[in-house]
């Protein structure tokens, strides 16, 4: 029964305090009561903390969008995080594209130029996917996690103490109002004692809040280090991707921009990098591409003389008039009157057939 009495008294006291704060807050809004203003330094610290919180949330959310564009995947990761469980590993977009390319290249035939190129591109895409996964993991650990810890930890504590400071200020101002309205000596004495207590509690809470807010500068310094880690992770990722694509380009051959005339065409003859060293003034149209025709090939067509040529890519003959080629083999080529400008006649032992000139590098 004593415990029940104590709880009822405490409940009544809490209700009285809440009512007193509500009355004081309302009168302040109506301009009927004075309000104790915080000092300028504390106000600046509060403004800085609020600004830090707002921008940290925006940067954190947009970084999550950057690293994981799929909103459904972000929601799934959020749910697993709240359940304190590890999200299942899923294949990312570059890895999926890479697998499709490898499967297509395998079906078309690794021995064909297109099939072989698809497989090489697919392997590169999968490596980019792995680098993408590493970027996400590193950024989440070194950048997103510290930002989230600030929002869910430090700032939450600051907000709690800030609210407590507001309540202490309302108590202080309510005590000041009661002292002004007190008429009897006994009531004045009681009100003065209440004012001293509320002033002391307000000053103490203001100091606690100030100490917490002054830690925002340390938070900025910590977030700066995290930002450097994020930039380094991105730099590593883009450097890896650049190197992967550079290696792929070396494998497939370069396609200089002056070789391309119309990207809207659906097909065209590949232009290997090795031919760029033999560019001449003439132009020859090849399906979706316009290439400069090497002068030594022009000479070959005019004289019908035989020349040795190295094969740059595997080529599967489309019909019995063409000759299949293997990369790096050396064959004899010559021109035949009336033959299409994109082709030469190739000869390997007793085998003869048309071969595309863009698959060849003429040897001196």
Image (spheres, rainbow, N blue to C red):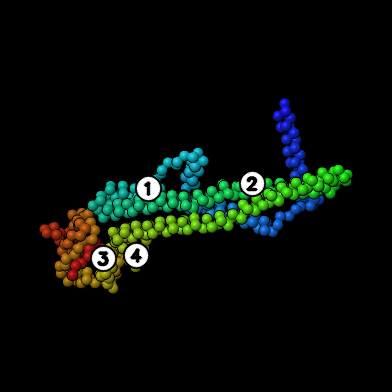
Confirm whether residue 264 shows in the render: no
On-image quarter of the N terminus: top right
Could you say whether the residue bearing mark 2 is in a helix, strand or loop? helix
Question: Which of disc 1 and disc 4 is earlier in sequence?
Answer: 1
3 or 1: tag closer to the N-terminus: 1
Dot in front, 4 or 3: 3
Label ID, residue 260: 4
Residue shown at 11% from the left, 58% from the top = 350
Q: Position of residue 195 (x, y in %)?
A: 78, 47
Earlier residue among tags 4 and 3: 4
Please, what secondary structure does the residue beneath circle 4 have? Answer: loop
Q: Measured from the top left, where is residue 283 in percent x and y?
A: 29, 69
Which residue in the protein does label 2 denote?
160
Q: CA distance from mark 4 to mark 1?
A: 29 Å
Q: Residues within 10 Å of mark 4 (few under 14, many from 20)?
A: few
Q: Secondary structure at mark 3?
A: helix
Viewed as shown, does residue 235 lie left or right of 181?
left
**Residue drawn 24% across and 58% down?**
313
How far apart marks 4 and 3 lie (CA) works out to 16 Å
Secondary structure type for disc 1: helix
Spatial distance from mark 2 to mark 3, Cα to Cα? 69 Å
Task: Please name the residue shown 75% across and 41% down the image.
Answer: 17
**Mark 4 near mark 1, Cβ–Cβ under 8 Å?**
no
The numbered mark at residue 96 is 1
Give the side of residue 266 with respect to residue 201, left or right: left
Which of pointers 2 and 1 indicates the residue nearer the eye?
A: 2
Q: CA distance from mark 2 to mark 1?
A: 47 Å
**Where in the figure is residue 335, as x and y percent of width and height?**
18, 66
Q: Residue furthest top?
A: 1
Q: Earlier in the sequence, mark 2 or mark 4?
A: 2
């Amino acid at each position: 029964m004593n415990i029940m009495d104590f709880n009822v008294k405490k409940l009544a006291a809490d209700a009285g305090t809440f009512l007193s704060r509500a009355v004081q807050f309302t009168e302040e809004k109506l301009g009927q009561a004075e309000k104790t203003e915080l000092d300028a330094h504390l106000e600046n610290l509060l403004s800085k903390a609020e600004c830090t919180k707002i921008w940290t949330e925006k940067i954190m959310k947009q970084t999550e969008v950057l690293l994981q564009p799929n909103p459904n995947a972000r929601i799934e990761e959020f749910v697993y995080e709240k359940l304190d469980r590890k999200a299942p590993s899923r294949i990312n977009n570059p890895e999926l594209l890479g697998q499709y390319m490898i499967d297509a290249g395998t079906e078309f035939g690794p021995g064909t130029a297109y099939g072989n190129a698809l497989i090489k591109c697919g392997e590169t895409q999968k490596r980019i996917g792995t680098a993408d996964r590493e970027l996400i993991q590193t950024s989440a650990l070194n950048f997103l996690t510290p930002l989230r810890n600030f929002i869910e930890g430090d700032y939450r504590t600051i907000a709690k103490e800030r609210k407590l400071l507001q309540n202490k200020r309302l108590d202080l101002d309510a005590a000041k109002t009661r002292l002004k309205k007190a008429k009897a000596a006994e009531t004045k004495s009681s009100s003065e004692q209440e004012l001293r207590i509320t002033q002391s509690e307000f000053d103490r809470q203001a100091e606690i809040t100030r100490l917490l807010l002054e830690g925002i500068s340390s938070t900025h310094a910590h977030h700066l280090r995290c930002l450097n880690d994020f930039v380094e992770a991105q730099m590593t990722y883009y450097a890896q991707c650049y190197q992967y694509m550079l290696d792929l380009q070396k494998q497939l051959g370069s396609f200089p921009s002056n070789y391309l005339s119309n990207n809207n065409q659906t097909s065209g003859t590949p232009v290997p990098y090795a031919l760029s060293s033999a560019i001449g003034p003439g132009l020859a149209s090849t399906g979706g591409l316009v290439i400069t025709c090497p002068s030594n090939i022009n000479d070959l067509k005019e004289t019908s003389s035989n020349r040795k040529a190295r094969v740059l890519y595997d080529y599967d003959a489309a019909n019995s008039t063409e000759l299949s080629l293997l990369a790096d083999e050396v064959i004899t080529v010559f021109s035949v009157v009336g033959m299409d400008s994109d082709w030469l006649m190739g000869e390997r032992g007793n085998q003869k057939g048309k071969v595309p000139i863009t698959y060849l590098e003429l040897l001196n």
